[in-house]
Amino acid sequence: MKTRLRSSEISLAHAAICVFIALPLLAAQPQNASTDVPKQETHGIIVANMDTSVRPGDDFNQYANGGWIQRTEIPPDRGEVDVFTRRALFVFTRFFLVMIDFPSVSTLPAKW
């Protein structure tokens, strides 16, 4: 004989499942966090790289990157400098030294 679940039993089962799902999420939240003050988020914009003396409508590239352009020197043997230039130089140097079996590879720094 089959037993049918009543709607109240189904509702109770759904509520229990929701509680078991919500408990770990509630436990992971910090207890001393204030809900009144909005959290300051970091969005990846480095304000020091901007040149706020230029209006964005006049020259947006200078406005967004002007500080970085003024501080960064491009070596004469390179056409450009980006975030990967220094790391690529390190990797190529290590690879070259390993390939020629340079005896002092282990004395090089682990990272630059």
Image (cartoon, rainbow, N blue to C red):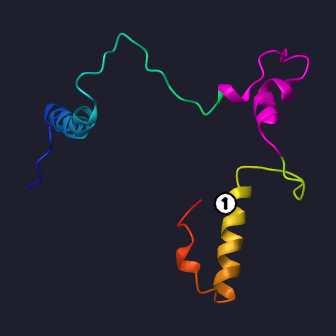
Work out which quarter of the rendered image holds the N terminus and state it: bottom left
Q: Is residue 17 left or right of residue 103?
A: left
Image-based side of 55 in relation to 112, left or right? right
Residue 106 in picture, x, y percent from top left:
53, 78
Residue 88, percent from left and from top: 71, 63
Whether the magenta-drawn stretch holds residue 63 is answered as: yes
| Picture residue at 48% right of the left edge, 21% below the top | 40
Q: Does residue 22 lie above or below 104 as drawn?
A: above
Residue linked to disc 1: 87
Q: Could you say which quadrant of the image residue 58 lies in?
A: top right
User: Which residues make up the magenta segment?
Assistant: 47-73
Q: Quadrant of residue 16?
A: top left
* Residue at the image position 81 percent from the left and 15 percent from the top: 53
How many discs mark residues in the rendered view? 1
Farthest top residue? 36
Query: What quarter of the picture does the C terminus occupy?
Result: bottom right
Disc 1 on helix, strand or loop?
Answer: helix
Amino acid type at mark 1: Arg
Q: Position of residue 38 (x, y in %)?
A: 43, 15
Q: Position of residue 92 (x, y in %)?
A: 71, 72
> Within 10 Å of the Cα at label 1, are there few (<14), some (14-19), or many (20+) other Cα atoms?
few
**Viewer-closest of 85 and 107:** 107
Residue 12: quadrant of the picture: top left
Q: Is residue 57 magenta?
A: yes
